[in-house]
């Protein structure tokens, strides 16, 4: 395996991931991966549009300037413009991929207007009858005015979260109207297999009435979805088994109709396919990009099993019932029978949409609680991505700067990587699939706080069991000291080091960051297991009692599970608002200054490998060639050219 820095700009560093073992796959498997990868790349424009109404037109305008031969590319304005465009590519739009704030251009407005006037008008996203100046007049306030659509996802308590969020899931609709609309749908549903209401549509107001513009062939995003379906059809010819063929057929049926009951049918087929070496996720999946937690951002990933690393994840999934039975939550909230939990370590072969360039390191699907309960779930840990992250972090001075003492640092250096991987496995394989809702509880009852509570629940489950002797018994940890490396690193991150990702004066808004802050701050403020200490004028975390910390984690897990199982919105709101949102400005400034001296990038993402079919003289495919040399800008421009469908 290898992981090396390809490029760095702003607060970002680009890495590469290697397709370990790809050459050992047979030709049919390689062709299957290739076709699925094409389907993955064709969703890119959908994600751009979902993340902001003007993103696609802005991207095309900026790319026209960037590629023009009539622009002086030696000026400071152009250099700042280039960084801005690279950030837009990275974030699938003009908002930070993690913090959701709008980027501040480092170049002058006059520079961009004059540059746009110089480029060939045919390369610009001009509407019928629109002039270049009309285009600038429409898009420039969105780019340059900090008060126009300033945030992609706003979660500030008390705000109208739809009207103050720039994400493109609603049009002319208020939060109150949207919540009422979907509550009516849920109330009128009489079946036993409820759809994920609102998952695949834009809620719009037409002639004063609310209606859904569904994302399907013949509806919104049709041109992109048609290409996705075409390549899914091509993939069917190379599927490893008939169940994979059925999975793809159900997915295409859903894309053609937009029927969420057919999405349920697809999920049930997908979660039951275990025999193949290759799998994929393709569709409107995670709801973190919607302040109400309903609309699915488009994402794609193609994967194949890492057989050696999968031994670890399968050991966990094979013991899923034991973990559920021994969970420290109220027995009413435990599953009596854990069904269909499967877990694999995989190698990512292609990333797309909301999984590219920044990607998750683990995934657990499907999201519907009733499908998990009746049919099970699939969990993956992405081994070649975690390996790339680990290699990039070793020796960069970060741990030496923020860990409290040499003994703790030695513990983290010895056990940190294995514990990180194991915590991810426990989070994805068991945490998300654990527990159950009480009968009659609305799975969306926690509303805007649902994502944070769910991530906290899965993290707490993983943390609790990471310190259990069962993991040593199963051969997953070498001894009962190892877990302390993860406990320290996790709490340090939640209390201190994740603050490097927040701008001065801002609060915590991203769901995963809120989750970590909630857990760490709750433990700090509700016992003596943790304390903040000063050494040489610097703030550090000190763990005073690891066993006591585990008991705190058990207590908080029990409460978080109760909140989810009962749908206790007010308790969720109080927990999140008290522990997960606010930032101490003095400590924040200190952490930022210490981190800045390390000269590191707080965020990392990936350049995809390029796949090319190799053909013989008869035109038959004989291999799929993997190329790791494509540059970041080169890849982004190629994707816009080859996979651009919506502008």
Image: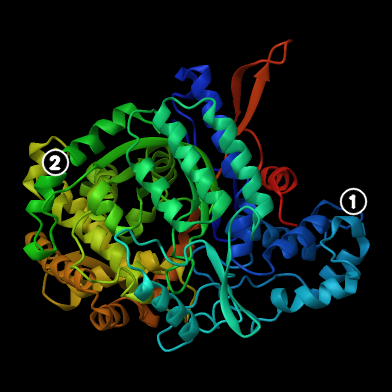
What is the number of the mark on residue 577? none
Are the residues tagged 1 and 2 within 8 Å (C-beta)?
no
Occupied quadrant, residue 564: bottom left
Residue at the (6%, 45%) spot, across then down:
469
Question: Marks 1 and 2, how far apart in space?
Answer: 61 Å
Residue at the (65%, 24%) spot, across then down:
613
Residue at the (83%, 71%) spot, across then down:
135
Q: Is residue 409 visible?
A: no
Mark 1, secondary structure of its residue: loop
* Relative side of 24 to 126, left or right: left
Residue bearing the label numbered 1: 69
Query: Where is residue 615 drawn, in percent x and y?
Result: 68, 17
Scheme by which the image is coloured: rainbow
Q: Is residue 73 visible?
A: yes
Mark 2, secondary structure of its residue: loop
Asked whether 612 or 162 is in front, the reply is 162
What is the number of the mark on residue 319? 2
**Above or below for 201 versus 504:** above
Asked whether 279 or 267 is in front, the reply is 267
* Relative side of 332 to 370, left or right: left
Asked whether 461 or 324 is in front, the reply is 324
């Amino acid at each position: 395996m290898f992981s090396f820095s390809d490029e760095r700009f702003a607060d970002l560093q680009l890495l590469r991931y290697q397709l370990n073992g790809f050459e050992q796959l047979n030709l049919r498997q390689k062709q299957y991966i290739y076709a699925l990868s094409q389907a993955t790349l064709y969703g890119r424009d959908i994600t751009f549009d979902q993340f902001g109404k003007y993103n696609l037109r802005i991207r095309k305008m900026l790319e026209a300037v960037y590629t023009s031969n009539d622009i002086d590319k030696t000026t400071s304005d152009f250099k700042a413009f280039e960084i801005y465009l690279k950030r837009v590519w990275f974030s699938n739009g003009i908002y930070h991929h993690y913090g959701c704030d709008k980027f501040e251009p480092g170049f002058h407005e006059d520079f961009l207007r004059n540059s746009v006037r110089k480029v060939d008008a045919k390369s610009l996203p001009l509407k019928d009858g629109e002039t270049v100046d009309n285009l600038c007049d429409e898009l420039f306030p969105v780019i340059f005015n900090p008060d126009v659509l300033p945030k992609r996802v706003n979660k500030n308590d008390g705000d109208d979260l739809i009207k103050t969020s720039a994400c493109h899931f609603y049009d002319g609709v208020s939060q109150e109207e949207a919540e009422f609309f979907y509550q009516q749908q849920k109330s009128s549903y009489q079946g036993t297999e409820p759809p994920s209401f609102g998952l695949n549509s834009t809620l719009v107001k037409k002639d004063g009435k609310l209606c859904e513009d569904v994302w399907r062939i013949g509806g919104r995003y049709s041109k992109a979805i048609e290409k996705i379906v075409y390549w899914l059809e091509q993939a069917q010819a190379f599927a490893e088994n008939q169940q994979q063929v059925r999975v793809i057929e159900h997915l295409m049926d859903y894309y053609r109709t937009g029927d969420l009951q057919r999405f349920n049918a697809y999920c049930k087929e997908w979660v039951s396919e275990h025999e193949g070496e290759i799998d994929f996720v393709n569709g409107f999946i995670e709801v973190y990009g919607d302040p109400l937690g309903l609309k699915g951002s488009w994402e794609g990933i193609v994967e194949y099993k890492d057989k050696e690393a999968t031994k670890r994840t399968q050991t966990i999934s094979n013991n899923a019932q034991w973990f559920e039975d021994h969970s420290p939550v109220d027995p009413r909230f435990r599953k009596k029978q854990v069904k269909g939990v499967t877990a694999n370590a995989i190698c990512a072969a292609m990333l797309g949409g909301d999984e590219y360039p920044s990607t998750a390191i683990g995934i657990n699907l499907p999201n519907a609680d009733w499908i998990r309960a009746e049919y099970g779930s699939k969990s993956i840990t992405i081994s070649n991505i975690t390996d790339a992250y680990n290699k990039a972090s070793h020796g960069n001075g970060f741990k030496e700067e923020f860990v409290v003492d040499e003994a703790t640092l030695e513990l983290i250096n010895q056990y940190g990587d294995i514990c990180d991987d194991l915590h991810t496995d426990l989070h994805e394989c068991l945490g998300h699939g654990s527990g159950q809702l009480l009968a009659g509880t609305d799975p969306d009852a926690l509303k805007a706080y649902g994502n944070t509570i769910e991530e906290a629940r899965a993290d707490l489950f993983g943390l609790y069991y990471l310190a259990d002797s069962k993991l040593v018994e199963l051969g997953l940890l070498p001894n009962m000291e190892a877990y302390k490396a993860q406990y320290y690193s996790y709490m340090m991150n939640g209390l201190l080091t994740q603050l490097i990702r927040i701008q001065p004066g801002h609060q915590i808004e991203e769901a995963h960051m809120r989750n970590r802050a909630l857990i760490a701050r709750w433990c700090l403020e509700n016992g003596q297991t943790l304390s903040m200490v000063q050494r040489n004028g610097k703030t550090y975390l000190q763990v005073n009692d690891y066993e006591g910390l585990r008991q705190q984690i058990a207590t908080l897990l029990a409460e978080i599970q109760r909140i989810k199982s009962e749908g206790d919105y007010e308790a969720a709101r109080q927990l999140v608002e008290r522990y997960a949102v606010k930032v101490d400005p003095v400590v924040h400034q200190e952490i930022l200054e210490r981190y800045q001296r390390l000269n590191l990038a707080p965020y990392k993402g990936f350049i995809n490998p390029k796949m090319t079919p190799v053909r013989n003289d008869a035109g038959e495919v004989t291999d799929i060639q993997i190329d790791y040399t494509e540059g970041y800008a080169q890849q982004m421009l190629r994707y816009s050219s080859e996979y651009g469908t919506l502008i």
